Amino acid sequence: MTKTTKAQPTAAALEKYYNEPVPVMLIKDNAKYKDDVTVTVNGVNYQLKRGVQITVPRKVAMVLERAKEQEAEAQAYMDSLKG
């Protein structure tokens, strides 16, 4: 019986993947979501403008997505406390 293994991506391949440009658009509503967003990844700051489509490295988009997920989980937890 032969065992198949999945090839592990190389460091260079991962670096290329995480730095690949992807489009994002942050909502702007002139109330809670009116200011630009600063994202820091590995000591590098990215200042992101709201209300326009911009291109950022995938690693920045992933941080934004995770922040959105955490905000939704926090809101669900607060709602559960209200009973």
Image: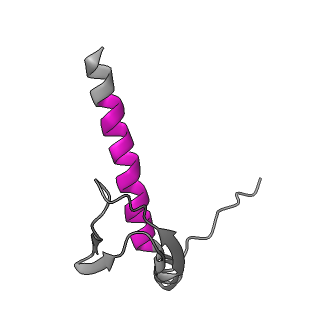
Asked if the stretch drawn in magenta spans residue 50, the answer is: no
Q: Quadrant of residue 39?
A: bottom left
Rendered location of residue 64, percent (x, y): 39, 62
Q: Residue at x 40, y 48 (%)?
A: 69
Identity of the residue furthest to the front in this view: 30
| Horizontal relation, residue 29 to residue 1: left or right | left
Residue extent of the magenta highlight? 59-77
Q: Residue at x 39, y 52 (%)?
A: 68
Q: Position of residue 24 (x, y in %)?
A: 49, 70
Q: Residue furthest left?
A: 43
Residue 73 part of the magenta segment: yes
Name which quarter of the figure residue 63 lies in.
bottom left
Vertical placement of residue 37 versus 29, above or below: below
Query: Which of 32 and 54 lies nearest the eye of the viewer?
Result: 32
Residue appearing at x 39%, y 72% in the figure = 60
Question: 76 or 44: which is nearer to us?
Answer: 76
Q: Is residue 64 positioned above or below 73 on the image?
A: below
Q: Position of residue 47 (x, y in %)?
A: 29, 78
